[in-house]
Amino acid sequence: MKQATALDILKSGRNVFLTGSAGAGKTYVLNQYIKYLRERKVPVAVTASTGIAATHMNGMTIHAWAGIGVKDDLSTADIRKLKTKKYLAKNMEKVKVLIIDEISMLHKNQLNMVNTVLKYFKEELKGFAGVQVVFSGDFFQLPPIGNQGETTRDKFAFMSAAWLEADLAICYLTEQHRQSENALTDILNEIRAGAVSEKSVNLLKATSENKLETEEPPQLFTHNVDVDRINEKYLLKLNTQSQTYDARTKGNPKLVETLKKSANAPEKLRLKIGAKVMFVKNNYEMGFVNGTLGEVIEFRKDDNAPVIKTREGRIIDVEEQQWSVDNDSGSPLASYFQLPLRLAWAITVHKSQGMTLDMAEIDLGRTFERGQGYVALSRLKSLEGLKLKSFNARALEVDPLAAKADQRFRELSLIAEQEIKNKPVEQLAKQFIRECGGLADEEEVKKHKIKTEEKKKKKKVSTYQITAEYIEQGLSLNEIASKRGLTEGTVIGHLLKLHAKFPEIDISKFKPADNILATVKASKNHLVANNPDAIKEDGSLSTKAMFDHMNGKIDYNNIKLALAFL
């Protein structure tokens, strides 16, 4: 099925299971549908089975959204208790469309619980209380975590009563947007079919001799301990300048904790010049996507943020990005702010889900879960970019039940495709929007889009401009730092950059005391005359050299400010 056909079925209001191989464009279709709904003011809940998948879509875990947590079942008392929670009541009352991404990793008991909770809150006996549900995923990827002794039959969501009640239209995407038709595509299809040929095994073994374009490609492992070991080893080998960046958070504490655990950008990020890094968020305007590889080439002088040179040769000035859990109108309930980077000498197969890699060195010798090999190999575009160090038999296995279900999904997708061809798609779409209380008139949709864009433009104010506004309001450095959630050092960096660019901005109130100015001036004169190593390549004086020369009597912030007035 093509993406456009899947979108037509979604717009018609049918409950849908959106599936297809890795790289078929499932996330793209979901994002297009979410955008379509929000433009028409239809309340949509964006959730996923895991925190990692949820952050990719600025959503929350289905467990948090439905209030089911990590329970295996819900008693009547549990459900009554849930109904007393105001945030849950708000979730349930407003929602018209519920999206659950990475459905393959959601246990069938948990899907049953979501169905039960929705019915109870909305007092409606229909499946999922009549809310349009959209499940997305690929059951050949990593399966749900279950109790000891459970088989996939006991775990897979499509084996649940809730799945049957949903009466889903199957949309099996078949266009390939990650790999073009090549040997790797054939191997992945053989893995999905559970029939890997001797020729494919030999092709995979032969990649161990591949000479990749870079000496240090990202390495994928099945275990965290291997990843941490490799990254720490390579970072320690670099005898270069280093910087550490701490993440910031805002909003609902419980949701913040979810973001901390799930965001691929670590809470404490330590980088050095020369460090191999990977971008872990999509930002097409800035020129990177989740999986873009690069190297730290310098740290900006004004705020110490890293400058990355990508493998394609693009230079990117990295800025802090936001991961958020949004409500159904797109406003953040909780936010996680960090540079969109992680060390990339090595990552786990689990963390690699959702990424596209040009090349990678992969070790599947300790594969312990069916689907891990498929996930790892499907990150790549071709065999030329793969160096497979080792693999065991399990690495090429998929679950037999998933394979059987996949064949049935393909058949049902063909039926859904034929059915939509004979229906008035546009009429059905407008009818569904009206039933949801949204904007069905295209003129109203246009007006709403214009208003939304105007709001976004107002919000898109540079970080320096925000600081400038606070300066004009007469706030102190401490007050500005507190309001912005930044350090005073960062605010001073903004202040000095603003003053250099716009001399008319009055920063006289931030002038240090005369005794500080005198001490800094004396230190500056001494170092210029006696210590040429203290002068950096750009002609400026090293603040660290001054700090050391004054035996730490004057802090870095006052040194920076004093230099601006000398």
Image (cartoon, rainbow, N blue to C red):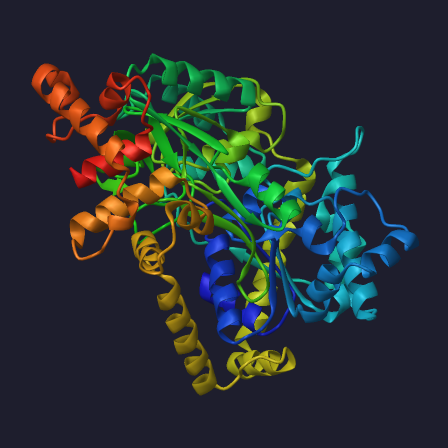
User: Furthest-right residue in view?
Assistant: 76
Residue 225: image location, x then y, percent:
55, 18
What residue is rendered at 63% in x and 28% in y? 369
What residue is rendered at 60% in x and 83% in y? 434
The answer to whether residue 126 is left or right of residue 319 is: right
Which is nearer the eye, 424 or 53? Answer: 53
- Asked if one can make out residue 452 in the rendered structure from this viewpoint, the answer is yes
Residue 142: image location, x then y, percent:
61, 37
- Asked if one can make out residue 223 in the rendered structure from this viewpoint, the answer is no
The answer to whether residue 40 is left or right of residue 394 is: left
Picture layout, residue 519 above or below residue 185: above
Picture layout, residue 40 above or below residue 235: below
Residue 313: image location, x then y, percent:
20, 37
Which quadrant holds residue 506? Answer: bottom left
Residue 501: image location, x then y, percent:
17, 51
Which quadrant holds residue 153? Answer: top right
Screen quadrant of the C terminus: top left
Which quadrant holds residue 453? Answer: bottom left
The answer to whether residue 538 is left or right of residue 216 is: left
Which is nearer the eye, 64 or 213? Answer: 64
User: Furthest-left residue in view?
Assistant: 529
Which is nearer the eye, 466 or 177? Answer: 466
Picture layout, residue 32 above or below residue 428: above
Count the labels in the image: 0
Which is nearer the eye, 560 or 42? Answer: 560
